[in-house]
Image (tube, helix red, strand yellow):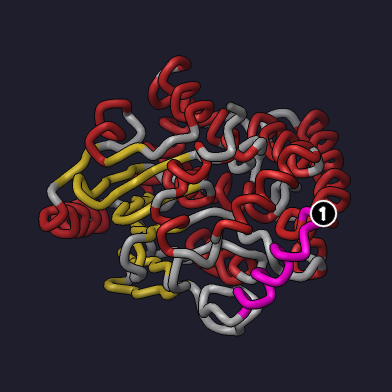
Amino acid sequence: MNVRQPTRTSAIAMSSKALTAAALLLLPALALSGQTKVAEKVDRGAEVKADPGQKHAQIKVDKRTPAYWRVTFDNPPFNIFGPETIPQMEKVVAAIESDPKLRVVVFDSDVPGFFLTHYNFTPPLAESTGLPSGPTGLHPLPDMLVRISKSPVVSIALLRGRATGVGSELALASDMRFASRQKAILSQWEVGAALVPGGGPMARLPRLMGRGRALEVLLGSDDINGDLAEKYGYVNRSFDDDKLDPFVDALATRISGFDRQAIADTKRLVDFASLPSDPEIAAGWDAFITSVQRPAAQKNIGRLMDIGLQKDPDVEARLGHYTQTLADK
């Protein structure tokens, strides 16, 4: 992949690797925060099916035609994105990049209420620190998001349920986003927990909705429904839930029938005019890694884990509300 600023990108990538290695040592501590009660709850949470320590496929690929694939997240109960998800997602992204017949991919979910949510804070250390950087030199998560954006294949996010953190960032990395008016919720919740979002929303959101609205979404750390997401430009359009799938399927099918080279060339020129550079994405990841190390973030994630993050359906479904409870009074 061509990088616009090789020297700068290499330096940032090296910085990102070093910070990642240091800060990911602390990820298990986020769940613990020195509180025995939280540690006990995390141990019980290992029994939940969503725990990425369990070996099962979290992503399904349905090749509807050679030119049109559906990539479906299926990690119940909450579609939490963890270190075990990364190699599975890497295989999908590599297949998208390398298949000469593919023209359109749609990302969706089989888990009711959840498109894709935040990063998992409880796995063993080695599951995060043992992952190599991706082809861009970035950590595998932002690396894959950058590659999805720059792929010659058209990517569409079909948003039903919560797209929180990583889910929002995947949607933003996709070329188009379509949401259920009744059931889609998007959020960048991280600032409310004393974190900085790491998957590129600071670089992408201002380009979509302008600086003021981007700051409202990022700093407000609140839930954004389908209608408001459409108004702000967070998504292309929102639809009544029963009309969402037929529209996305018809659009994907239509595009998949067009000339692949014309699609790729047109997308490349739009990318040139609109995508953030790799160093911008890397800077966001570095800021996330730095924020993870701060005591305030460790304390707040510990508090969220204590009240049920990653275990209690109400906490995951109303994360904006529970994040508000962390605010200083």
* Residue found 52% across the figure and 63% down from its top: 80
> In screen coordinates, is 210 left or right of 308?
left
Residue 171 magenta: no
User: Which of these two is toward me, 217 or 106?
Assistant: 217
Q: Position of residue 165 (x, y in %)?
A: 52, 47
**Can residue 47 be seen at all in this image of the molecule?**
yes
User: Which of these two is toward me, 291 or 296?
Assistant: 296
Main SS, magenta region, reads helix
> In screen coordinates, is 10 left or right of 288?
right
At label 1, which amino acid type do we have? Leu
Q: Which residues are magenta?
A: 33-46
Residue 45 magenta: yes
Q: Position of residue 130 (x, y in %)?
A: 81, 66
Q: Position of residue 16 (x, y in %)?
A: 80, 42
Q: Quadrant of residue 186?
A: top left
Q: Position of residue 40 (x, y in %)?
A: 70, 72
Q: Which residue is mark 1?
A: 26
User: Which of these two is toward me, 115 or 236?
Assistant: 115
> In screen coordinates, is 126 left or right of 329?
right
* Residue found 72% across the figure and 47% down from its top: 138
* Residue found 26% across the figure and 47% down from its top: 179
